[in-house]
Amino acid sequence: MEKNIELRVLEAMAVRGVAVDENHLQKLQTGYEGEAKFATLVVEFGLSHLMWVEDYWFKIEDGPKRQPDFLLVLPYEWIAFDVKNYKTSFEYREGKCYANGWSKPMDNIVSAAENRNENLQQLAREVTGNISVRSALVFINENCHVTYDRMPNDVELVPRTLLRRFLEQYRHTPPLKDWLVQKVSVVLDTYRTEYGMPFEALKVEDFASLRKGIVCGGCGFCGTERDKSQIICHQCGNKQTISEIVRYHTIQQRLLFYDNPEMVTTRHLYELMGKQITIRSIRRYMGNHFKVVNKGKSSYYQVDIHNTFK
Ligand SMILES: [Zn+2]
């Protein structure tokens, strides 16, 4: 499962010495770990043949942007999953939510799921008239103790220990017919929206102050040495080829300047990697793998931000 763009951008910024909100970064990392664990369990419990939609942001007219972590689309039912990675506890009491033993209520994730159900119901109606929508809040951490005074309507609270039972009821559900997958996809695309980054993008002039050097693709450490055609990490001993290194930094540069694709140039990559890889090697790799846009001074490499490091 892929990390979302926001997390990837923040990780790239942090390694380059940009001041980021550490708490927020950690929250995203913990969330990602929980979602990755959930995605693994879906396969393990034998449900990978069903239609799962990941990272779906949508919006109805001027309403707020909403997102289920995973949307399971069945013939007569849609289930929106939120995966929560709280370490110790979750409590739903008198319509309020509490996590990890805090006495102060947190964001109301139950009422947010209820509102989202209503919105998704509207989308489902455009597919066919008889689809029911509900949500499942999955508490993926084995040590998270879940309690409630009443189970909310259409929002099921699912502790890790009951997840297998919850999911296995759909194990024998046949996969969606192709025409229905298409119909659902068309409706989902109609309401799809881009997730806006909650922090400001780096500006062109910020490039100068970024920490330069080669970052290890294995552990993310900035500090390596070159041994002939290999780059060896000081931290974890990971060995990478020049091609792997150039690819990694190309994507990192694209993420750092996520709203400015023109920042992926030979010169910038050369400097980002601490001038440790020759311009010639960079040009050779880039020329073979990415399209060049424009000519001369304004040329840059076209890199899709959804590209991955691998
Ligand atoms: Zn390393």
Image: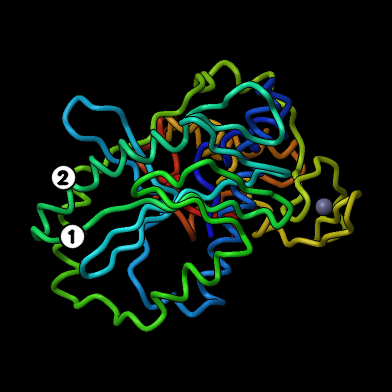
Q: Residue placed at 39% from the left, 34% from the top?
A: 112
What x and y, as percent, mark residue 146? Answer: 62, 48
User: Is 57 on the left or on the right of 192, as rendered?
Assistant: right
Asked which secondary structure carries label 1, the reply is: loop
Tell me if mark 2 has few (under 14), some (14-19) or many (20+) residues whose alpha carbon lies within 10 angstroms of its own: some
Name which residue lies at 20% across and 42% down: 191
Instruction: Give the camera-side residue of 41 and 298.
Output: 41
Looking at marks 1 and 2 on the same chain, the residue that comes earlier in the sequence is marked by 2
Q: Position of residue 43 (x, y in %)?
A: 52, 74
Give the spatial CA distance, label 1 vs label 2: 10 Å
User: Which sits in the foreground, 147 or 131?
Assistant: 147
Taking the spot 57% from the left edge, 46% from the top edge, the residue there is 84
Instruction: State the image coordinates of residue 157 (x, y, percent, origin top left).
Output: 50, 51
198 displayed left or right of 309? left
Secondary structure state at the residue bearing disc 2: helix
Tag 1–tag 2 contact (CB < 8 Å): no
User: Is 303 rendered above or below residue 132?
Assistant: above
Report which residue position mark 2 lands on: 122
Three-letter code for the amino acid on which mark 1 is drawn: Ile
Q: Residue furthest top?
A: 205
- Residue at image coords 9%, 60%: 128
Quarter-of-image position of residue 181: bottom left
The crowding category of the residue bearing disc 1, from other C-alpha atoms within 10 Å (few below 14, some 14 to 19, many at least 20), is some
Residue farthest to the front? 149
Q: Indicate the amino acid at tag 2.
A: Gln
Q: Confirm whether residue 211 shows in the render.
A: yes
* Disc 1: which residue: 131
Residue 290 screen position, x and y as percent: 45, 53
Q: Nearer the viewer, residue 274 or 254?
A: 254
Left or right position of 227 against 158: right
Residue 250 visible in the snapshot? no
Q: Quadrant of the C terminus?
A: bottom right
